[in-house]
Image (cartoon, grey):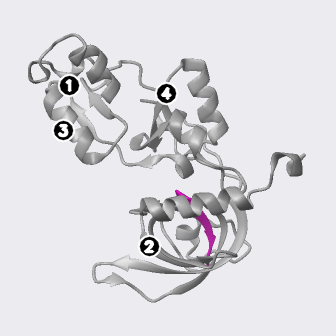
Amino acid sequence: MPNADEQHRKTPHPQLTLVAHMMTPGVVQIPGDVSVTEAAALLEREHMPCLLVKDTDTCFGLMTPTDIVKKVLAQGLEPGDVEVHTIMTRSVHFIEYDSIVEDASTLMMSTGAPILIVTKQNQPVGVLTARDLVLSPKRCRTRVPATIRVIGEHGPGAPHQATILQLSHVGAMVESPALLLPGTKVLIDFTLPDVKLELSVRGTILNDYEQIVQTGTPPSLSAPGVDIQFTHLSPTDQSRIKAWVLQNSPKLSDQV
């Protein structure tokens, strides 16, 4: 795993699509001596594209459903008798959450890796697959009125007015005068223009606000927006947002 001090820190441009926008949040990590039977059950239960295997303090691997099929079932082996470290893919490639998706595509093409583990400050926070990059549209630039409520121990708090600047079916960039710190759970309500579809979506704030925390000054309306990673979005709402984004995103010919 890359050293956090060696990562190139950068301030993302608000119009760029980042790895954090496209990844599947969360990483399921297991030790190398877990049986394939247990690992397969974990894959199914967590609905993840892979498991991150930590065989030693410095040795990582990935286990996917394809590994189980090709290296266990196709070989006539008993899954309960096989430990995951014997079938895992040992080349694991990591990428920082605030890298642009073009960097992820380049890394996948140069290494042949269909899966990247996304890190934040040297800690795994998500999974990015080649399928994500192929099927996920880039964010559509827009200005959609919204309200945001911070979710606390007793449920959502008071609503704050906001504006969605960029939108995809996995997340949004939102302009808000409220101070929204990384890791904050929120509920964002908005209506998609034209189709008049009202949505209430849970999400997690991704942005880092070190400077805001140090100065104690909330972001102004001219400041870059905060990134929200959607969570628990139903397949139906995902499809509706994706269709709206595809319909309202500028065509390639319009960008030349």
Residue under circle 3?
A: 41
Q: Tell me the residue at 25%/14% (across/down).
A: 74
Q: CA distance from mark 3 to mark 4?
A: 22 Å
Q: CA distance from mark 2 to mark 4?
A: 31 Å
**Which quadrant of the rendered structure holds the C terminus?**
top right
Mark 4 Cα-neighbour bin, 10 Å: few <14, some 14–19, many ≥20: some
Residue under circle 1?
A: 32
Residue under circle 2?
A: 186
Q: CA distance from mark 4 to mark 1?
A: 21 Å
Please check the rendered image and state whether residue 170 is part of the magenta-colored stretch, yes or no. Answer: yes
Q: Is residue 63 visible in the rendered structure shown here?
A: no
Residue 185's spot in the image, x, y percent?
Answer: 40, 69
For discs 4 and 1, the disc positioned in front in the rendered view: 4
Q: Tell me the residue at 66%/56% (across/down).
A: 139
**Foreground of the two, 130 or 177:** 130
- Specify the segment rendered in magenta: 169-176
Q: Quadrant of residue 27?
A: top left
